[in-house]
Amino acid sequence: LGKTVFGVEITNNLMTVFMVVVLGSLTFISLGYMCTTFVRTLDAGQSLMQTVQFPMIFLSGIFFPKEFLPSFLKPVIAFFPLTYLGNALRSVMVGAINWNDLGRDLFVLSCWLVGSFLVTLRFWKWE
């Protein structure tokens, strides 16, 4: 869509970009399910997801460069999975792949995927 509508040039293999997008999507779907296992109502689930999403979106370096944020937030930034998804997508889309950094980003996303999936499996209740 970005390439067709906005003229974004993807300089890397589309399959690599697709794989990173799928991993990121699965990670955040799993994270969403994990968060909703701990609430009882739809309103509580929406509130919890907004509480999780809002800081993640604004502190992960997606909208604002991480360098503009105070240094005491650096550990928080390193905790968010969106930070690693943004880094991975930037590197594969512009063709400036540092395989060590990309490997770390994919590893962290995979850990979030597996961890949130396992927590969801443990606490999910069909009610």
Image (spheres, grey):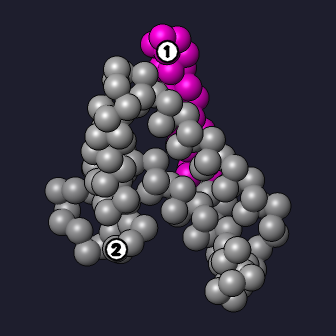
Find residue 69 and report its horizontal and vertical position in percent.
23, 68
Q: Quadrant of residue 41?
A: top left
Residue bearing the label numbered 2: 64
* Between discs 2 and 1, the one toward the N terminus: 2
The tally of labels here is 2
Q: Is residue 100 above or below residue 11?
A: above
Which residue does the image show at 17% across and 56% down from the upper left? 72
Q: Report the disc number at residue 124.
A: 1
Residue 120: in magenta span: yes
Q: Report the disc number at residue 84.
A: none
Horizontal side of residue 107 vs 42, given as left or right: right
Horizontal side of residue 97 vs 43, given as left or right: right
Which residue does the image show at 44% across and 57% down from the upper left? 83
Q: Is residue 116 above or below residue 17?
A: above
The kind of residue on which mark 2 rests is: Phe
Find residue 125 and report its horizontal and vertical position in percent.
48, 11
Any part of residue 107 in sight: no
The kind of residue on which mark 1 rests is: Trp
Q: Which residues are magenta?
A: 103-127
Considering the image in quadrants, where does the N terminus appear? bottom right
Find residue 98 and report its horizontal and vertical position in percent.
63, 66
Label 2's element? loop
Which residue does the image show at 31% across and 35% down from the upper left? 43
Q: Could you classify mark 2 by the number of other residues whose Cα lies within 10 Å: few (under 14), some (14-19), or many (20 or more)? A: few
Q: Quadrant of residue 36?
A: top left
Near-viewer residue (65 or 22): 22
